Image (tube, rainbow, N blue to C red):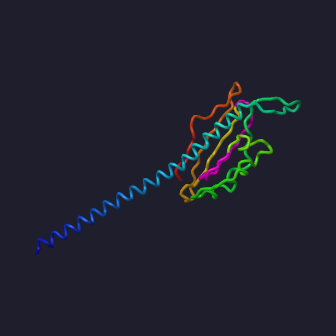
Amino acid sequence: MQHDHVRLQLTRIEIVIALAATAALVLVAVNGVHERRLWARAAEARNALGVIAKDAATAYANESPWNDGARVVWRHALCRSASASVPAAGVAAVRGKAYASTPSEWEVDAPTRSGFACLRYAMDEPQYYVYSYTAVGSFEMGDSFTAVANGDLDGDGRTSTFALTGTVTSGESLHIGPQIIETNAYE
């Protein structure tokens, strides 16, 4: 009889060990899913900035009318800065959630042919980041643009930032930076 009591105790210990191992595996799986979700959302920013840079290079490659004060000349020029980020409300609009922008938000600068309208860039899927585009100068050597994505994926108030730049170089060409600069990519 004492032998049965010992066997019952071992069975309980085995059950506790099995439950603990199962809980550990579930925790690892849940953490992995969470990390994959953050990685996929950060991929949105990387992809969007790559497309914005491509659109900036395309816009620069196409000559535009430019008034030099005496006459209108055709030349390569960067799209001028966007007057507002999308969403205009900033990171609060994407804090821990997706934001569904409207086409009009991306076209706000259409009358002046600047910003995202000049780039012909818009997102039609919900976004987890706030996008901005700024340009310094237009066509002189050293003039540049910067495209930025800011987000707060987990809603904790700490933001992630992704930035990509392009610079006008000699020979009227536009050089896009070799990499996206990332700060707190998964915040």
Q: Residue at x 42, y 57 (%)?
A: 30
Q: Quadrant of residue 77?
A: top right
Left or right relative to 119: residue 21: left
Estimate the x, y position of residue 109 in percent, counting from the top left: 76, 46
Estimate the x, y position of residue 126 in percent, counting from the top left: 61, 53
Q: Is residue 139 magenta?
A: yes
Q: Quadrant of residue 114?
A: top right
Q: Residue at x 45, y 54 (%)?
A: 33
Q: Identify the residue at the far right of this view.
A: 70
Q: Residue at x 59, y 48 (%)?
A: 161
Q: Bounds of the magenta span?
A: 122-141
Estimate the x, y position of residue 113 in percent, counting from the top left: 77, 41
162 or 50, which is in the foreground? 50
Q: Quadrant of residue 29?
A: bottom left
- Main SS of residues in magenta: loop
Q: Please say if 146 is above or below 26.
A: above
